Amino acid sequence: MESNPNYINQDDFNKILHAIPQLGIRKWNNDDIVMLMKILYHMALRPSEGIKAKKEDFDLKNRFMFLGKTKTSTNDKAVIPKVFLEELSEYLASKPEGRLFPNLSYGTFWVWLGKLGILLNIEAWQAGNRENMKENTKGHIFRKSWGKDALESLGFEKINVISAHLRHKKPSMTFDHYLKGNIQTVKDTI
């Protein structure tokens, strides 16, 4: 699937990860920022949820991350996918207790996305893109991309699983509003 303002395919996601050093970030290690991007994607997190992550929030044995109060829940958890567990475990083993990305703010992260948008021509991350901004695509593109990848690989019959991983209360929210599903999506999937 081609990348678009609502979606980043795996090739473009890898380009983003490889472009992190070009941002010239001095306060944080490039490998940490790469891992933040991977956490956001694989765990379908909102940027603020990943940015405030602490090592002790992760329960690797039970494969979840405690999120606490989120936009939609007072005691939320996110599932750690099996395919990401080993890489995340190795990363966390090298980190001390406390925040994984100390003093990182959403504003700083937003600036990085804007720079990556210009550098890699990612439409959703470029300033002045009002249509996508109202959909909150800039911050949610990792969630939306994971959802679309899951829909393509798991199929429409797993929309309940996809919706649960995105922590949506209703599959209709996931399909209609979030993944921008339509009759063509259904025809292409089933």
Image (cartoon, rainbow, N blue to C red):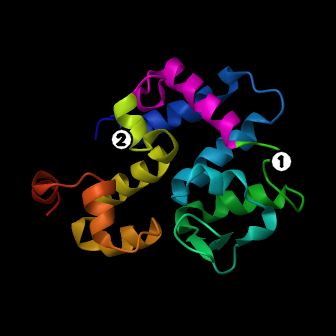
Res. 132 in view: yes
Residue 169, how many percent across, how many down? 40, 74
Q: Tell me the kind of residue under disc 2.
A: Asn
- Magenta: main secondary structure: helix
The stretch of residues the image draws in magenta is: 106-129
Q: Is residue 139 left or right of residue 97?
A: left
Residue 51, how many percent across, how many down? 69, 50
Q: Is residue 116 left or right of residue 28?
A: left
Alpha carbon separation for disc pair 1 and 2: 29 Å
Instruction: Pick whichever, 28 or 74, lies toward us.
Output: 74
Which label is found at residue 189?
none
Which residue corresponds to mark 2?
6
Residue 134 higher or lower than 27, as above or below: below
Give the image quarter of residue 7: top left
Res. 8 in view: no
Specify whether residue 2 is painted magenta.
no
Q: Is residue 37 left or right of residue 165?
A: right
Which residue corresponds to mark 1?
102
